[in-house]
Amino acid sequence: MTGSAGLWITFEGGDGSGKTTQARLLQEWIESTGRTVVRTREPGGTDVGRTLRELVLHHRAADGTSDIGPRAEALLFAADRAHHVASLVKPALERGEVVIQDRYLDSSVAYQGAGRVLDPAEVRDLSLWATDGALPDVTVLLDLDPVAARARLDADDKPFDRLEAEKAEFHTRVREAFLALAAAEPDRFLVLDASRPITDLADDIRTRVTPLL
């Protein structure tokens, strides 16, 4: 993030792509070098964010259907993002710490823009306005075929949230949007095939991050 003393790394990709595992491995490795790491996620990285996470990912109407419209959903994610960046991310970067974050505005462009068939540019602009233009230094995109991702989620044997439960066509649009974002900003993105071994992926991420530490 331009003008900050710290380093901001975000992880993106479809549900089941392995973001949590790689974020944990990167955190452990960076901390072993003596740097302070703040690991967080969107939504849910703050007290306010946890309330918004429960609402936007798990809220259902009385009949069990979703009653949050696409635009309302995008606005809720942007509200969480505004608070998260201002209250947690920017202060950590100003202290010279490393922020490792699971999802950021690219997820909104992919999920609400492409997945919900809103205007991706408008969704992106909304998040940039909410965060005063804040962008991470590196974004790791773990790319995985939606069929393989669903098999991983099924193996976890836990209830799906509102986005995980969407149909295959939705997740295909999300994947295509992530890849288009990465192609548009190759200097920020590191795109990795998430079907590769975990240790190989971790090595590639370390190689990208090392010169920035």
Image (cartoon, grey):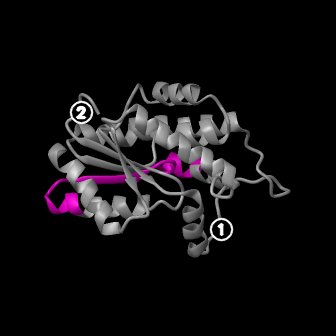
Element class at badge 1 = loop
Q: Nearer the viewer, residue 75 or 203?
A: 203
Disc nearer the start of the sequence (1/2): 2
In the depicted structure, whether residue 176 falls above or below residue 41 = above
Q: Position of residue 209 (x, y in %)?
A: 22, 49
Residue 83 on image: x %, y %: 47, 37
Is residue 29 rendered to the left or right of residue 74? left
Rendered-image quadrant of the N terminus: top left
Mark toward the viewer: 1 or 2: 1
Q: Position of residue 68 (x, y in %)?
A: 73, 43
**Mark seen at residue 159:** 1
Percent position (x, y) of residue 185?
38, 33
Residue to which mark 2 is pinned: 4
Q: Looking at numbered disc 2 in the image, what kind of residue is underneath it?
A: Ser
The residues tagged by marks 1 and 2 sit, at their Cα atoms, a distance apart of 39 Å
Q: Which residues are magenta?
A: 29-52
Pick the front one: 182 or 63 = 182
> Are there few (<14), some (14-19), or many (20+) residues within 10 Å of tag 2?
some
